[in-house]
Amino acid sequence: MSVDFRLNGINNGYEQLFIQAGTIGGDTPPPPIPEPSTLLLLGSGLVGLGLLGYRRRK
């Protein structure tokens, strides 16, 4: 990560501070989300909630 500070117009009374941040080496895309495991986790949670509701009504 790089950070750049620039101060412009020090002598005329209208100072401006520019701050810029970025990554070195370009942008890297986020890792892909593994969809089958996400759906399995969601499904098991819904089944668990269904069983909990069933046990409470019984």
Image (cartoon, rainbow, N blue to C red):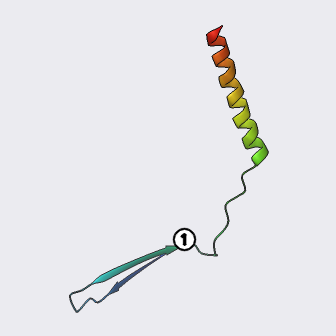
Which quadrant of the view contains residue 39? top right
The picture places residue 8, in percent across and down from the top left corner, at 33, 87
Q: Nearer the viewer, residue 29 or 58?
A: 58
Judged left or right of residue 17, residue 56 is right
Q: Position of residue 2 (x, y in %)?
A: 52, 74
Report the residue that reaches farthest toward the left: 13
Residue 31 vertical position relative to residue 16 in the rendered view, above or below: above
Q: Nearer the viewer, residue 2 or 18?
A: 18
**Residue at image coords 73%, 30%:** 44
Residue 4 position in % (x across, y down): 45, 79
Is 20 on the left or on the right of 37, as rendered? left
Image point (63%, 10%), residue name? 57
Q: Residue at x 64, y 75 (%)?
A: 25
Amino acid tagged 1: Met
23 relative to 35 in the view: left or right:
left
Q: Residue furthest bottom?
A: 12
Quadrant of image for the N terminus = bottom right
Regarding mark 1 in the picture, which secondary structure is present there? loop
Q: Residues within 10 Å of mark 1 (few under 14, many from 20)?
A: few
